[in-house]
Image (tube, grey):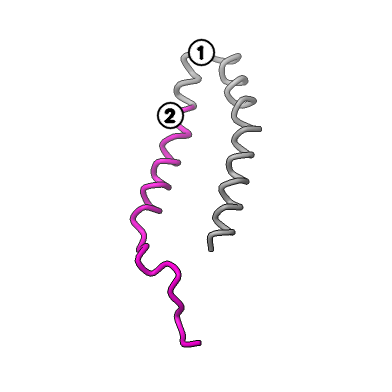
Amino acid sequence: MVPVMMGLLMTGSNFGQVTGPIAVGMVVSAWGWGAASVMVVAAAIPAGLAAWMLARGDHNRVGETSGQA
């Protein structure tokens, strides 16, 4: 599971680095610098919710197998 999660982390990080400056630049050129903070907050809320939901998981069972070997 760790390699899958690392792949998702790297993909999301790279996607954000490519699309973030473009999207914020378009918002700033359309509505001014004040709108950039709204966009950052709008992106931070779902990220915070996702982190909170992941933190609530049961981490005591990580690495345990479901059956006998």
Whether residue 9 is in magenta: the answer is: no
Does dot 2 land on a helix, a strand or a loop? helix
Q: Residue furthest top?
A: 32
Left or right: where 40 falls relative to 8: left
**Residue depicted at 46% across the width and 87% down the height:** 68
- The residue under the point 46% across, 14% down is 34
Q: Nearer the viewer, residue 22 or 55?
A: 55
Q: Is residue 66 above or below residue 51?
A: below
Residue 1 is tagged as none
- Secondary element type, mark 1: loop
Determine whether 40 is above or below 56 in the image: above
Q: Amino acid type of disc 1?
A: Trp
- The relative height of residue 30 versus residue 60 in the rendered view (above or below) is above
Residue 46, percent from left and from top? 44, 41
Name the spot of residue 62 as percent of width and height, x first: 42, 67
Residue receiving disc 2: 41
Magenta-colored span: 40-69
Comparing 20 with 39, the one in front is 20
In the rendered structure, the answer to whether residue 49 lies left or right of residue 4 reads left
The foreground one among 15 and 30 is: 15
Q: Which residue was labeled with disc 1?
A: 33
| Residue sitting at x 41%, y 37% | 45
In percent of width and height, residue 28 lies at 56, 16
| The stretch drawn in magenta includes residue 64 | yes
* Furthest residue toward bottom: 68
